[in-house]
Structure formats: structure tokens, C-alpha cells
Amino acid sequence: MPLYRDEAVVLRTHKLGEADRIITLLTRQHGRVRAVAKGVRRTTSRWGSRLEPFTHVDLQLAEGRSLDVITQAETLEPFNARLGLDYDRYTAGTVMLETAERLVTEEKEPAVQQFLLLVGGLRAMAGGEHPAKQVLDSYLLRSLSVAGYAPSFDHCVQCGIEGPHRFFNPSAGGVLCASDRLPGSATPASETVVLLGALLVGDWPVVHAADPRHLREASNLVTAYLSWHLERGLRSMAYVER
């Protein structure tokens, strides 16, 4: 079987037979890949901790007919070790993994930007420099943007008039002016709209200075925007306090 190397983040795993696992990966060059790790559930396996969710790994794989086979695995960054010590960061991280899998829909289709964004997001989540919820909201907005669902927070998405605008509608793709307001649009505080823009571009001084009320309102709007474009919610989101 032809061999190839790639770096990847482990998104999830599930059991196969008595000793194997199927590992779902987001790789740098090959996009989403499902591969078998043979014998990984045995206590003598040298790969056990290297193929857990959150782990950033360097892999060698053999191409298979339906599933590839992992033949070598080396840990690059053990995000799982650090995230597992903090419930808020761990649960927020699981949302990031599920989002990445949902947004990269085609197997073996390159998704370099999504891969780099996920690695950077997990590094920020594990580093602890920013609050977990803020890292998550920033990651969600950026990953949606890379997937082609970039929200607008400074121009009306219907007519293009520059804001600030007070109305926000997930189905429209961002903020709306008073003339183009759609029924059911949210009316967030102007500070919340500024905060959403800061989360999108990673303007952390603005994010850190935000009032807790506006942070909560922004999180709710990010969740609504994500749910709309994914067409159904994320199971892991239920464990994150929003």
C-alpha cells in the first residue's frame, strides 16, 4: 500500500473490533482523514496516548481501500494533557474539534487554513492567556469565515452601508441597517457588535476590556450564527456554559 506522511489533529476516536480504533483526523495536507490504528487499545500499545483527541501528531499512513492505516505516530503537541486539567477549556476544546469536523465535510480534500486555525486555537486554549469562552468564540467566527460564512459586523449585509448598525440576523449573515432589518433580528448593544468584530479579527485588548454582559450577549449570537450555518447544533455545545 502506498505510504504518505502528514501532521494532524485527532478529532475523535471510536472502537473497532477488540483492539483497534478508527481515528478521525484533520490533517494539514489531506484534510479530513479516517484511519485505523491497529492494536491501539492494548495495554502494551506504544501509540495509546499519541492518538487521543486534541493531540497534534506527525503521522505515517498507508493508503487503504476504505480506511487508511496508521503505521507511525509521533506527538508534536500534547494539547490533551493540558486541556484535560481544566473543565472549561476541555469542554470548549471539544466544541472546536466538533466544529472542525463539521466544517471540513469532504474526506481527503485539503483544508490547510482550517487545520492551521484549529492548531492555533488549541494552542491558545491550552496556553491560558485568554479566557476559554473568548478563545472559543473567536475560533468559531474565524472557522466559519474560512468556510465561506464570514459575518459582517461593520457594514449592512444587504445594502453595504457602513455602520454601526444595531440589528443582527444569522440568516442574513451579519448586521443590518434599519431599512433592511428582517423580522426576528436581534438588537444587540452597540458595544456587543464592536466586541464581535474584535473576536473575529483577534483584537484581544478590546475583548479583554469588554463588559461581562456584552461578552455573554456576543457568545449567544456566535452560537446562533454557528447553529444557523451548520443547520443543526453541536452536541458538545451543551456542556459549555454560555
Image: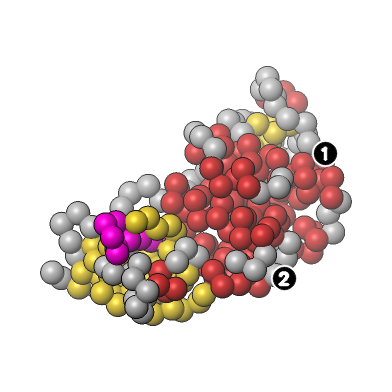
Q: Residue 124: give x, y in percent of width and height.
A: 63, 68
The quarter in which the N terminus is drawn is bottom left
Residue at disc 2, secondary structure: loop
Give the residue drawn at x 33%, y 49%.
106
Q: Quadrant of residue 69?
A: bottom left
Give the residue drawn at x 66%, y 60%.
87
Residue under label 2, please give it: 129
Q: Quadrant of residue 220?
A: top right
In the rendered image, residue 199 lying in the magenta stretch gets the answer no
Residue under label 1, please give it: 189
Residue 17 lies left or right of residue 222; in this view the side is left
Q: Residue 81: give x, y in percent of width and height.
A: 56, 73
Q: The disc labelled 1 sits on which kind of residue? A: Ala
Q: Quadrant of residue 183?
A: top right
Q: Earlier in the sequence, mark 1 or mark 2?
A: 2
Question: Relative to residue 115, is residue 154 depicted above or below?
Answer: above
Q: The disc labelled 2 sits on which kind of residue? A: Glu
The circle drawn on residue 86 is none
Q: Main secondary structure of the magenta part?
A: strand
Q: Residue 39: give x, y in percent of width and height.
A: 28, 69
Report the front residue among 98 and 53.
53
The span picked out in magenta is 16-26
